[in-house]
Image (cartoon, rainbow, N blue to C red):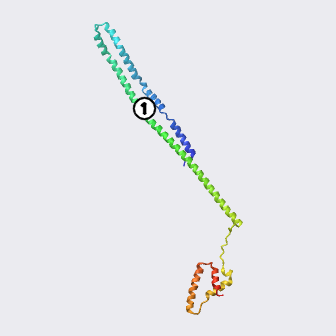
Amino acid sequence: MATTAQRLAEYEELYKKAQGYDPNQFENQFEKEYNEAVNYNKDLIEQQSSALGELQAVAPTLREKYMNTLISDPTAQMALIAQARQAPITQWSTASNLLNARGQRYQDILGKALGAYQTSAQQANAAAENAWRLYQDAIQQEQFNRQLAASRAAAARQEGMNLADLLALAGEGGGFQSKVDTTPINVAQSNPAYFAALTKAANWEPQNQTLANIYNGLRDTVGKFVYENPTPISFVKKLFSRGK
């Protein structure tokens, strides 16, 4: 996973790239390069200029020419002048049409190029904005990780303090024992006389068969209870002490 520094560096690079897009500058640069490619339409401009010059010179030239000829009728002269003007007018019109066609073609090319340029600019801005969001997410993730680490450290310190308190209490005798004696207690060794009496009572059997059956049933019941509850020594003592 990228770090905050890496996300910031990525955003700065993409932001700088996005800021480098300038549609106006692109259009000016594109127009310059296009005009250089077509030599600024000098061929058509010169053709227009030449045709216009010829058109303007037709009337005075022909009037001067007709002064020394038999064509003295002004109406006839005007008809001849109008006819002579058709050639330069046609040349000028052709050059103008070509200029207009080139201009339209230039606008089409510029529109496509500028559209592609603006699309790239939008993509660059979107990439920069996305990088900014990732950078903000990285900051929040780092803050969360720091808070989580601090919480875990605090919990670990608290747990260590609780354990230390328990050990201190155990060392001071505050209700806890540092070592528990798990050695089983031998009842026979702790009270030999009682164990002997209990053994004798357990081995006694009555002579009468009916009484024997009752006694054996009672002995089995008491024995089961003692087996399942190994600590009721006081109860057994009281039971056998009644016969004394």
Q: Residue at coordinates 58% horizontally, 49% vertically from top-left? A: 143
Q: Residue at coordinates 53% horizontally, 39% vertically from top-left? A: 15
Give the residue furthest to the front. Answer: 242
Three-letter residue code for mark 1:
Leu
- Give 217 or 22, whichever is nearer the viewer: 217
Q: Quadrant of residue 81?
A: top left
Give the residue furthest to the bottom. Answer: 208
Residue 6 seen anywhere in this rendered image of the structure: yes
Q: Which residue is label 1 attached to?
A: 110
Q: Residue at coordinates 36% horizontally, 15% vertically from top-left? A: 56
Give the residue furthest to the right. Answer: 172
Residue 178 seen anywhere in this rendered image of the structure: no
Q: How many marks?
A: 1
Residue 203 percent coordinates (x, y) = 61, 88
Secondary structure at badge 1 equals helix
Q: Quadrant of residue 113?
A: top left
In the depicted structure, whether residue 136 falls above or below residue 33: below
Q: Residue at coordinates 43% horizontally, 25% vertically from top-left? A: 40
Residue 70 percent coordinates (x, y) = 28, 7
Residue 231 percent coordinates (x, y) = 63, 78
In the depicted structure, whether residue 25 falls above or below residue 171: above
In the depicted structure, whether residue 104 falls above or below residue 80: below
Q: Quadrant of residue 161?
A: bottom right
- Give 90 or 189, whichever is nearer the viewer: 189
Q: Is residue 182 left or right of residue 217?
A: right
Tell me the crowding category of disc 1: few under 14, some 14 to 19, or many 20 or more residues within 10 angstroms, Cα based.
some
Q: Is residue 121 left or right of residue 200?
A: left
Residue 202 percent coordinates (x, y) = 61, 86
Image quarter (top left, top right, bottom left or bottom right) of the C terminus: bottom right
